Amino acid sequence: MHELLPGIRRWQAAGKRVALATVVDVWGSAPRPLGSKMAISDAGEIAGSVSGGCVEGAVATEAQDVLHSGVPKLLHYGVTREEAWAVGLACGGTIEVFVEPID
Amino acid sequence: MKQTIFDLVSQDSDRTFALAVATIIDGPRSVVEIGRQILIGPQGEHAVDDRTESLGDPALDQAAHHAAATAIATFRPQRVGIGEGSERITIFVDVHPPRRTMVAVGGVHVAIPLLAFARTLGMRTIVVDPRTAFATRERFPDVDEILHQWPAEALSALGLSAGSYLATLSHDDKLDIPALAAALRSPARYIGALGSRKTHAKRVTALRELGFGDDDLARIHNPIGLPLGGRGAHEIAVSILAEIVAHDHAVRLTRVEAPHNEVPTSQ
């Protein structure tokens, strides 16, 4: 969390709304451990990471939805045969990310 | 996450204990409120405001408190499932440790890169040395605190916690032994002592005379740092922080001996 704070504080001071994404489950060779975090502002800025860069874009998009609706989301990412070319983890792991607004 | 909870967990610099946040992340929406969360401290206190006192069910609260105790003790988040099938409720218990603090005892050469690298790793940094010529702002431009005090006094005022990492570097028993004694009386997460095995054996004798036993003395990392073979101040700093990273993640490394004694003294 510590490395996200300067960004979150700056965004909030500028009146932006912020969502927090946390890795809540990892399976296989996931790149970031349980509890890894990424913050997303309603202007699309990001700080931190939940993977090695594979799913951050998708999480940031979902975060805008969460900020809009105010309803948290549980997201699943992983590589399967069918979705190998969709957003997923190149390393073959599976992760679950919980996205919630800070309000 | 409620702003009130966020503010509490993010103020980690002065906190000496971990806080846990238990959140309902999955379950039937007819039964639970996804995103509902409670803050749990080391003694289980959890009231931030009226809305965050409970996850909405005593059984969920009990499960969350149980997992939080583990998370707070180990600094590792926990995931708890309650119930089966479509009724299954998942709680994620995150942990927010106190901010890690690296304390260097002795404002010597090695302390300069050690504290600079520790800062890069996100740690608060403190140098303790009563000798004002050593611990100067010029030598340590970026450290958070320079304490010109004897270690016993400085460390007792500072209050070492489970988020503290301490390295004695001074090679001066008047500084190193009281610092090690203070660290051993605290829950400090890492204690390292620079100095040869021979030097350290003398310190161990002195610490035994102060009443410390085998279990206490086993907490001290000596020789300090992983044996990477480097002899320069920057290299020793890397080896100490590498040891701290391994220690933090409970990685047990097989110690290989660096060829220190085979290196010609001219190097």
Image (spheres, coloured by chain):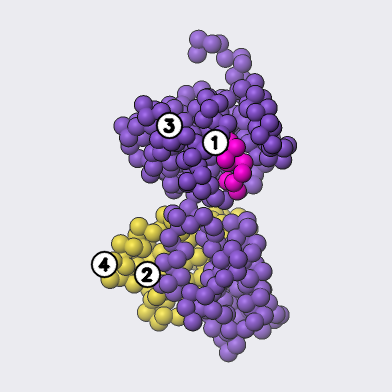
Chain colours: A yellow, B purple
Q: Could you say which is closer to the camera, residue B198 or residue B234?
A: B198
Residue at 54% across, 54% down: A31
Task: Give me the disc on residue B179.
Answer: 1
User: Label 3, label 1: how many angstroms apart (C-alpha)?
Assistant: 12 Å
**Dot 4 corresponds to which residue?**
A14
Mark 1 vs mark 2: tell me if same chain. Answer: no
Q: Position of residue A39 (x, y in %)?
A: 41, 64
Residue type, label 1: Ala
Q: Could you say which is closer to the camera, residue A59 or residue A9?
A: A9
Mark 1 vs mark 4: tell me if same chain. Answer: no
**Dot 3 corresponds to which residue?**
B130
Classify mark 2: helix, strand or loop: strand
Mark 3 vs mark 4: tell me if same chain. Answer: no
Of the image marks 3 and 1, the number of the one nearer the N terminus: 3
- Circles 3 and 1, Cβ within 8 Å, touching? The answer is no
The residue carrying pointer 1 sits among few (fewer than 14), some (14 to 19) or many (20 or more) residues within 10 Å by Cα, namely many
**Dot 2 corresponds to which residue?**
A18
Dividing the picture into quadrants, the one containing residue A58 is bottom left
Q: Could you say which is closer to the camera, residue A98 or residue B250?
A: B250
Front tag of 1 and 4: 1
- Circles 3 and 4, Cβ within 8 Å, touching? The answer is no
